[in-house]
Amino acid sequence: MWKTILRRFLVMIPQLILLSVLVFVLAKMMPGDPFTGMITPQTDPKQLDALRAAAGLNDPWWTQYFRWVGNLFQGDLGNSYAYRRPVTGLIGDRAVNTFWLALFTLVISYAISIPLGVIAGRFEDSNRDKAIQVYTFILLAVPSFVFLLFSLLIFGYILDWFPTSGYVSLNVDAGTPAYWLSRFQHILLPGLTAGLLSTSGTIQYLRAGVIDNTNEDFVRTARSKGVPERVVFSKHILRNSLLPIAAFMGNSITGLLGGSIYVETIFSYQGMGQLFISSIGTRDYSVITALTLLFGFLTLLGNLLSDIIMSIVDPRIRVE
Amino acid sequence: MKKKSAFGYVTLTAALSILLVACGGKSTSNNTDSSTAKSVSFSTAYKSSKAAIKGGTLNVAVVTDSPIKGIWSEQYYDDQTDADFMSPAAESLFSTDGSFKFTKDGAATITFDNDAKTATVKIKDNVKWSDGEPVTAQDYLFAYEQVANKDSETQRYTGALQNLEGLTEYHDGKSDSISGFEMPDGPDGKTAVLHFKEMKPSFTQSGNGYFLESAAPYHYLKDVPFKDMAASDKILKTPLFFGPFVMSKIVAGQSVEYTPNKYYYKGVPKLDKVTAEVVSSSSIAAALKNHKYDLALEMPTATYDNWKKISGYTNLGKEELSYTYLAFKVGKFDNDKSVNVLDKNAKMNNKSLRQAMAYALNNDDINAKFYPGGLRTTATTLIPPIFGEFHSDAKGYTLNIKKANSLLDKAGYKKGKDGYRTDPDGKKLTINFASMAGSDAAEAIAQDYIQQWKKIGLRVKLTSGRLLDYNNFYDKVEKDSKDIDVFQAAWGLSSEPSPADLYSEEAPYNMARFVTAENTKLLNDIDSQASLNTAHRVKAFKAWQDYMLDEAYVVPLQYRMAVTPVNNRVKNFNIAYGSDGTQWQDIQVTSASRAK
C-alpha cells in the first residue's frame, strides 16, 4: 500500500512539470500582460515599459520559465503584479477561507445526499422516492448561480438570517471565540446552498447503486440463507452501493478546494476561485501559474485519495 | 487620488444582477417608452431638513466583483476600489474648486513663481497625522521618494514628474537626494519649494501630473525599504493618514472600519464610526432594497433600471471624468523613434469618410435606449463640459444620413449595385470595426453602429467577428493590428484637461496614430508659456476642439454620469467635485436606523 502511494507521488512529478510548462506558455500566449490594464492618460507608457523590462517580461518564455522554476525551488512563487505582494501569502490567506467553506459544503452535501439516496433506493417507486427524485431534478435543472442568488436574496436580505458578504464581520477581534463564531456564520449560507446544490449527483448514484445491488445474486443468496433484512441491507447492499461515492470523494474534495467562482463572487467571499478569475482578467501571471499548479496538484492528489479510499472500502483493490 | 483606469472590465456576474432584481418583488417595469425617456438631471447633494443625531454609524458599500487589493497608500495604490476605501481617511494636500483649480482650504497651499520657475508648498501648522505627529516638508519629500525610487517599481513615476529638477537623477540612482526639492525651514519645517525645469499652464489645475499632491508619513515608514513598502504591514494593515477618519480595523480584501481622527485639522468628524464593505454587483440592488447600506459607491450603471427607484434612497449624480470615443486608424506607432507616423494611404485617411461615419450614428437614440434616465449623453467635443471654460460649445456630430451620403458621394465613394460603396479608386471597401465586450448593451450598440453605417452604404465588419475582451482589444489596438480600421473605446480623464498625453505626436496613447502639423501646433499652444495666461489657454483649448471635430480622427460619442444612491437619513453628503464635494467630517445621520 505504502509502495503504491509512493509510486503515485513520484509519477506526479513529471505530470506537474508538464502542467507547469503548459500553463506558463498558455498564460503568456494570452493577449495583453499585467501592465495592459494600467493604461490611463496619467500613466507614462515609458514607465510601463520599464516595469515590464524590470519584471523580465520581455525575455523569451523559456528564460522566464527557468527563472520561475529556480525561484520555485527556493519557495518563492514571485510577487503578484496586481497586489504587489508575494503570491504565497496572497494564496495562503484565501486558501484558508476556501478550505473552511469547502469542508462545510462537503459535510452538508454528504449529510443530505447519503440518507436521501439510500431512502430513494430502498423504497424504489414509493412516494418518498418520487419526492426525492423531483428534488434532485429541480436541483439539476436550476442553474447554480440562480439558486445562489435566490438563497442570498431570501435568507440573506429578506429574512436577514445570515450575513450577506465577506468571511468575517468587522466588529470582532481576531482569535476570540466571537471571531470564530462570526466566521462560521459567514460560511453557513454559502456552504448550505453550495452543499445542497452538490447533492443531486450523489443521490442519483446511490439510488441507482442500491437498486442494482438489490437484484444481485449475492443479495439473493444472503436472503435465502435467512440473513435478517436489516443486515442484508447494511452489509451487502449499502456497502457495495457506496463504492462509486467513495471513488468520487477524493475528487469532490479537491474540486471544492479549488474554490467556486460563483459562490465566492456572489457572496463576496474571499477565496481562491474569486482570486483565480480576477487574476486571469488582469493577466496576473504569477498568481495564475501558482494557482493552476496548485489546482493541478490537488487534482492529482484527489485521484490518489480516491484510490486510497477505494482500497479501504473495497478489499479487492488492496491486492498488491 | 484622481485616477481611473481605462474602462472595459465586466465580469461574468454583471449579467446576473438583472436576474436577482427580477426576483426582488416589485417588477421594475421597463415599459416607460425609452424613446420618450427624458434625461433626468441629477443633483449632487440630498438636502435633509431633519435634525442630525449625535454620533451614529455610516455604512458604505463599495461595488466590485474583483477582490480588493487594499494597498492603502496614495503613492502605491492603483485602482478605483482602493481609492474609494481610502477616501474617508486619506486626504490630498491641496483643496480644489468644482473645476479642479487649486484653492486655499486644504491641508497645504501652493503658489507659483513663473519667473523663478518654482512652486512653494506651505503645509498648515495644525495639520497632523492621525498619531499626532505634525505633517512636515519631509513628509511631502517622502511621497516623492516613494514614487521616484527605482525599487518602488510604481507606475506613478512619469515623464511629467521629471519636470522637477533632479528627479531623474534620483530615480536613476545617480543622486541620493532630489536636487529640485528644497526645504527652506529644514525637514521638520512646513515649507517646500519645488524647482521646475519649465513652468506649465496646467500647474494651477489639480491632477496635472507635474507634481505630487499627497504626503506620506516619513516618521512612520522611514525604516521600511522601498522594495518592500507596498507589501508592508504598515501600509496593508495599519496605514497612517491625516484625513478625517482613521482606518481603525481592516479585514483584508473585504471591509474597513473607520473611527474619527481626533487630530484632524478641520475639527473632529461628527460621526462615531464609518464602515465600508465590498458588495458584488449582482447583489447590490437587493442589498439597497433591504436598506443594508447608507450609500453605495461605484454603482453599475448597466443595471440602473433595477435600482433607480428604491424607497428611502435618493440618487445623486455627477458627470464622470471620461468619455467614450470612436477613433479611426490612420497610421502606426514607430517604436524606434517613439513617435506616431501618419500613413497618407491609410483606408481611413479620408476626412469625408470619417465625417460621414460620424454623421451616420444615432447616439441620442442609443443613449435613450440603453442608458435611460440621462446616464449617458451624446458627447460633443473631446473636452467634457465638466471642465467649464475649457469646454467648447461646438455642436458636435448628430445624426444626419443625408449629409453623410452627400459627403461620401462628393469624395468619390460610389455606390455599387449591391448597395455598398467602393473606395475612390473603385475597389471594394470593407471597414473593420473593433469594440470591447462588456455589458449586454455593448453588443447591441456595436450592431446598431454597423447598421447605421450600412444605411450610408458602408460595409463594416466586426474585427474577429465578435466583440473583443479587454486585454485582446488593447493588445490589438496598441500594436496597430491590420484588422482594425475603426474602434470604439473610452478614456478616464485626469482632472487636468490637457489632451497632449492622448493625442500628441509622441503619445503612445494616440491610438488613432494621426499626426498633423496643425494638431501639433494647437496642442503645443495649450501647454505653451503663452497659455500661462488662462484666457489664452481657453482659446487654445477651443481651437483644438474645433479642429478635432472637423478632422474627425477621434469622434467623441458619449459623456457618462456616475450615480450614487444615498439613504435619506444621511445629512451633508455631497458628491460634487472639489471642496464642494464629500467632506467626510461633516457627514451626519438624522436617525439611528436607515430611512425605509
Image (cartoon, coloured by chain):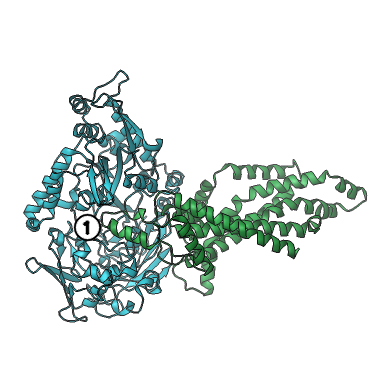
Chain colours: A green, B cyan
In which quadrant of the rendered image does the C terminus of chain A lie? bottom right
User: Which residue corresponds to the image point at 67% horizontal and 50% vertical from the top-left?
Assistant: A202
Along the line of sight, which residue is nearer the eye, A129 or B258? B258
The subunit letter for the residue under badge 1 reads B
Q: Residue lying furthest top in this view?
A: B417
**Rendering coords of residue B550 (x, y %):** 15, 38
Along the line of sight, which residue is nearer the eye, A38 or A201? A38
| Badge 1 element | loop
> In this rendering, is residue B113 above or below B384?
below
In which quadrant of the rendered image does the N terminus of chain A lie? bottom right
User: Which residue corresponds to the image point at 24% horizontal and 75% vertical from the top-left?
Assistant: B177
**Rendering coords of residue B525 (x, y %):** 11, 52
- How packed mark 1 is, by other alpha carbons closer than 10 Å (few <14, some 14-19, many 20 or more), is some
Along the line of sight, which residue is nearer the eye, B212 or B308? B212
Q: How many marks?
A: 1
Query: Quick check: A80 left or right of B140?
Result: right
Q: Quadrant of residue A285?
A: bottom left
Residue A111 seen in this snapshot: no
Residue A20 seen in this snapshot: yes
Q: Which residue is mark 1?
A: B577
**Rendering coords of residue A293 (x, y %):** 55, 58
Label 1 sits on what residue type? Tyr
> In this rendering, is residue B500 above or below B350?
below
**Rendering coords of residue A258 (x, y %):** 56, 57
> In this rendering, is residue B498 above or below B147?
above
User: Which residue corresponds to the image point at 59% horizontal and 58% vertical from the top-left?
Assistant: A16
Q: Quadrant of residue B184?
A: bottom left
